[in-house]
Amino acid sequence: MTDKITLAVNHALNDVRLARARALAFNPGMGLDAKRESAWCEYGFKQELTFDDLHKLYRRGGIAHGAVNKLVANCWRTNPQVIEGEQSDESEDITSWESEINQVFTHRFWRSFAKADTRRLVGRWSGILLHIKDSRGWDQPVIKGKALQKITPVWASALTVGSRDNAGAITMWQYTESLSDGSTAQRKIHPDRVLIIGDMSDDEIGFLEPGYNACVSLEKVEGGSGESFLKNAANKQNINFDAGVDFSNLASMYGVSVDELQERYNEAARELNIGNDVLLITQGAQVTSMVNAVSDPSPTYDVNLKTFSASVDIPSRIIVGNQSGERASTEDQIYFNSRCQSRRGDLSFDVEDMVDKLIYLQIIKPVAKFSIIWDELNEQSSSDKLESAVKMSSINQTSLASGQAVFTVAEIRVAAGYEPDGIYPLTELEDDEEEDEGNA
């Protein structure tokens, strides 16, 4: 009776689940399979993704965690520079304004900013708390002109809008602070002390959202293949008795009843699994191990990995660290560096917002024009530059046989990463030697 009730309940729940899947299938945010309306639900993909879903994926998913961290690590491999004037003024001497702001934009400051960038990639947006030395509470406006002590990155889940004015502007934030003892505390924070990076819009697409479904499939492949190996390692035994076996006589041999015979064989199976030299005596039975062939998960895993790689625009070799060839790995690294260099342009807007915020709070002095500059990620290393200089020198040595050098000494020094130092070109030195010979 109980089994029938269980089957009825399971059947009813399945009907409800399928009905819900069919209803949700008409939602444009659900699956793309118009023929199978409930396919999205059958795949195990969620209809809506919350911050907790994305945060859990980052914390527990190795592929997603690696994609976020490697992108942030490469983008923030070196810190940006805030300079006075246009980007073309980079080569000029450091101004007094730049020397002053360098006391604020320290290495520790940029590391905290990079952590906020990580939180933004995971949760669509994140916040930065400004610790101002004005001896006021968090819920009070900042006293302008005071120094900045430090900045603290916070997750989007820890910040909620406390209140807004009639125009919709935020007048107070509600911050959930995690304490060292595992408890939390609620704080009201004035907008002067908060900077938001990212987009808080409801229709904003997070960095991990497009590849979330692929990560769900990856988890199934990883867990399913691991479970298959575990079940095979369990070494389950199948005992096939002949049709003429008398179980009453067999049970009497072990001194147990027929109902207890199953447990005796379970004990024998456990002894077989934990022992090295164990004998199993059977009468009219054949014992075989229940082992299934485990399929190779690599093809299915690679398909989902490539789908996730496409969603985050990072080569799969970069994410998993599988370098299958020097040329392939070099090309992937060049592409990844270019992708990070392009993203640095977007990060510059966040840095500009921070500078504008600090200028508004009079922590740093205003200036007519400032710019954000980054170094080049695909710039040659020192060994690469010296190798280029060696090749240029070799070309010169070959071409001098015809009486003409291809590269000047100054060009070779620049290619090696050094200043020209005003050395004359080889062609000019040769002309001077010819003039000396003529005068002689």
Image (cartoon, grey):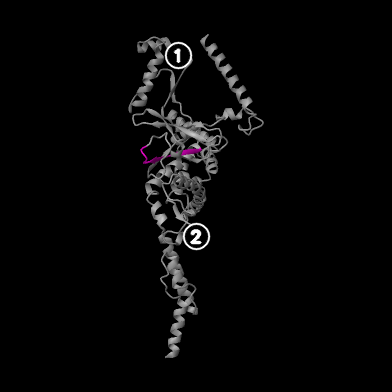
- Looking at the magenta stretch, what is its main secondary structure? strand
In the rendered image, the quadrant that contains the C terminus is bottom left
Q: Nearer the viewer, residue 376 or 380?
A: 376
Q: Is residue 333 above or below residue 287?
A: below
Q: Is residue 296 visible?
A: no
Image position, residue 93 (x, y; %): 42, 61
Q: Nearer the viewer, residue 318 or 381?
A: 381
Q: Is residue 391 magenta?
A: no
- The circle on residue 196 is none
In the displayed structure image, the side of residue 27 where residue 82 appears, left or right: left
Q: Considering the numbered disc 2 on the image, is that residue within a helix, a strand or a loop? A: helix
Mark 2: amino acid:
Ser
Q: Nearer the viewer, mark 2 or mark 1?
A: 2
Q: Is residue 185 above or below residue 265?
A: below
Q: Is residue 134 magenta?
A: yes
Image position, residue 281 (x, y; %): 37, 20
Image position, residue 290 (x, y; %): 46, 26
Residue tagged 2: 88
- The circle on residue 245 is 1
Task: Measure the alpha-carbon separation of dots 2 and 1.
Answer: 94 Å
Which residue is the extreme one toward the right? 35
Residue at image location 49% in from the left, 34% down from the top = 171
- Circle 2 Cα neighbour tier, 10 Å, few/some/many (<14 / 14–19 / ≥20): few
Q: Is residue 322 above or below residue 124?
A: below
Give the extent of the magenta segment.
Answer: 124-135
